[in-house]
Image (cartoon, grey):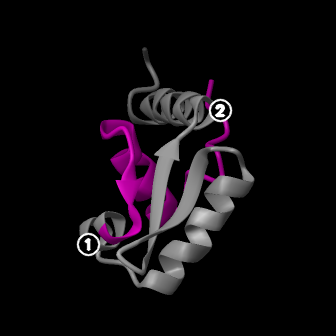
């Protein structure tokens, strides 16, 4: 009845990042930092883990001589998030 929850998404910050990316086409690092209120170093680590899992795409460029990191969710990431939510709903309401 209960399915394992994806350990990649089960981290609060990684789940927050993916949740943000589910609602936008792409987001820059500053937007994610501002929205999650997390430290830049922690966000960088979690983005690396999401990227390694194939859940997000990361593009690093320069804008006006400043680094600009843009992140978007992949099809695999979108599917993993939807499965995570479906599995979590079974924990919340196991009778359905």
Tell me, yes or no, whether the highlighted magenta stretch contains residue 24. Answer: yes
The span from disc 2 to disc 1 (Cα, nearest Å) is: 33 Å
Where in the figure is residue 66, as x and y percent of width and height? Answer: 41, 80
28 part of magenta stretch: yes
Q: Secondary structure at mark 1?
A: helix
Return the mark for residue 3: 2
Tell me the crowding category of disc 1: few under 14, some 14 to 19, or many 20 or more residues within 10 angstroms, Cα based: few
- Up-down: is 11 above or below 2? below
Outermost residue on the top side: it is 96
Residue 32 is situated, as x and y percent measured from the top left of the image, at 35, 64
Residue in view at x 46 percent, y 25 percent = 94
* Whole-percent x, y for residue 59 in the image: 56, 57
Q: Residue lying furthest right in this view?
A: 52
Residue named by callout 1:
34
| Quadrant of the drawing holding the C terminus | top left
Where are the magenta residues, as a range?
Answer: 1-30
x%, y% of residue 95? 43, 18
Relative horizontal placement of residue 44, taking residue 39 as reference (left or right) = right
- Foreground pick, 27 / 34: 27
Quadrant of the snapshot with the N terminus: top right
């Amino acid at each position: 009845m209960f399915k394992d929850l994806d350990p990649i998404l089960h981290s609060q910050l990684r789940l927050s990042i993916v949740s943000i990316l589910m609602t936008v086409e792409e987001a820059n690092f500053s937007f994610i930092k501002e929205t999650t209120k997390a430290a830049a170093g922690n966000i960088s680590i979690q983005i690396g883990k999401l990227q390694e899992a194939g859940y997000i795409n990361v593009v690093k460029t320069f804008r006006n001589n400043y680094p600009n990191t843009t992140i978007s969710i992949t099809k695999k990431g979108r599917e993993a998030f939807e499965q995570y939510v479906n599995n979590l709903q079974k924990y919340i309401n196991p009778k359905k």
